[in-house]
Amino acid sequence: MKNILFLKKENTIKFALKSLNGAFGKIGCVVDKKKKLLGVVTEGDLRRAILNGNSIRNKLANIINKDPTFIYKDELISKKLVKSKFISTKLNDSIFYIPIVDKNNKIVNVLSTENAVNILENKLEKKNKSKLPHILIIGGAGYIGTVLTSLMLKKNYKVTILDKLLYDKKIFKNNFKKNENLKFILGDVCDLNVQINSIKDIDAVVFLAEIVGDPACNARPEDALKTNYLSLSSMATLCSLLSISKFIYTSSCSVYGINKNNDLLHESSSLNPISHYARIKIMSEKALLSNKTDTFQPTILRLGTVFGPSLRNRFDLVVNTLAKNAFFNKKITVNGGNQWRPNIHVEDVANGIIAAINAPLSKVGSKIFNLSNEKLNYKIIEIAKFAKEAFPSAKLEVKGSNTDPRNYRVSSKKFTIATKFKAKNNIRNTYNEFKKIFLNRKIKNPNNKIFSNIETLS
């Protein structure tokens, strides 16, 4: 009986959302005083009711599905179920349990749809729909988003991508085959109508859409404010209204700015932003947490400097840039070199986001975490020397001037404790990854503007 939730028709939408919170696929069974089944309701039903103009204070009486799929207890004989007129062959993708009732319509248990269909047909013709949550990835066609989408589809998540394809118009056509678990919405997250249309039937949101990096934000400061802050704030408000509890936002360790003592920084360390990009990140974190409720508990991940190959490659990131220059230009140029940076592979970022989605809300809800590979806190000059090892024919040149004063190294122990997640990839192996990609001529023109945020936006 652990998968069944009893509700009364006098209960409010707000009460039902709070009761169903985070339990993907769970149903609320609306019953009378004798526990006779009156109807069922899901989180999707409740969110659609709100979008249709209902207040969260409205009662369930007029919202519930009064003609639900259910099974009579007497039809479960020796674990075999005869074909029942009450079983629909077109079950809603979001419902994973069916009530079992006695001859008086009193609920006695629930049965998973997978078992119900298997018993009904007495054979498994095809795998049942995924019981994993339906994820909306905003910015899913980007550097991190394409890696995350690929991993989630491999894990059988149902994924909806919202992206305006700012950097590469053909990214999905060239890299993703037709998949029933993948839906793509071409649109701008800054458009409120697009936000509302994309959020229907969604269980969790990953917000990746933004103007990324200091140079790109400086090039388009107003667009950065609109995309990175205002659209995030409105999306958070909408998700809070709909009680979508899991909302993963990727912030940045750039918020730490300069740390002259080279301390190992934690989430409670002082913030010292030195760029428009970092300041907007702090504003966005505050906006998210100001929207938190019992049923909306966002998770903020402050990413280290991301590196590694992706379906949408970037060569305006430290490791990736050095790999490109070492191979194609036979030159590795470093400005200063003594600045510390925390680093994390793009695949580890994607797996970290999945870990946050799967973690209990009690562990990650309404919390901020550093997400980096603690073993990869390096000075820029060390990262350059790794490049020299991988590309020995390249010349290493160190210039005295430091064009980027950011200097910080971070700890990610808090996230590891909360989720048991640990980053695995390292920089040396990644340089070898890039070498194979370059040698196989998978990237023929690394200077194409699609590989650089700042070049695309200029």
Image (cartoon, rainbow, N blue to C red):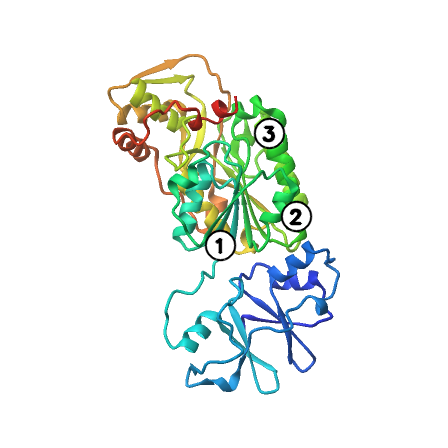
Spot occupied by residue 3 in the image (x, y as percentages of width and height) = 54, 70
Residue 75 makes an appearance in the image: yes
- The crowd level at tag 2 (other Cα within 10 Å; few <14, some 14-19, many 20+) is some
Q: Are marks 1 and 2 in contact (CB under 8 Å)?
A: no
* The quarter of the displayed image where residue 270 is located: top right
Q: What residue did someone put label 1 on? A: 358
Residue at 44% from the left image edge and 70% from the top image edge: 114
Spot occupied by residue 271 in the image (x, y as percentages of width and height) = 59, 31
Left-right relation of 261 to 338: right
Residue at 53% from the left image edge and 34% from the top image edge: 252
Circle nearer the viewer, 1 or 3: 3
- Amino acid carrying label 3: it is Ala
Spot occupied by residue 74 in the image (x, y as percentages of width and height) = 51, 87
Q: Secondary structure at mark 2?
A: helix
Circle nearer the viewer, 1 or 2: 2
Viewer-closest of 292 and 53? 53
Viewer-closest of 258 and 434? 434
Residue at 52% from the left image edge and 70% from the top image edge: 97
- Amino acid carrying label 2: it is Leu
Q: What residue did someone put label 3 on? A: 224
Spot occupied by residue 121 in the image (x, y as percentages of width and height) = 41, 76
Q: Secondary structure at mark 3?
A: helix
- Amino acid carrying label 1: it is Asn
Q: What residue did someone put label 2 on? A: 238
Q: Is residue 406 above or below residue 356?
A: above
* The quarter of the displayed image where residue 219 is located: top right
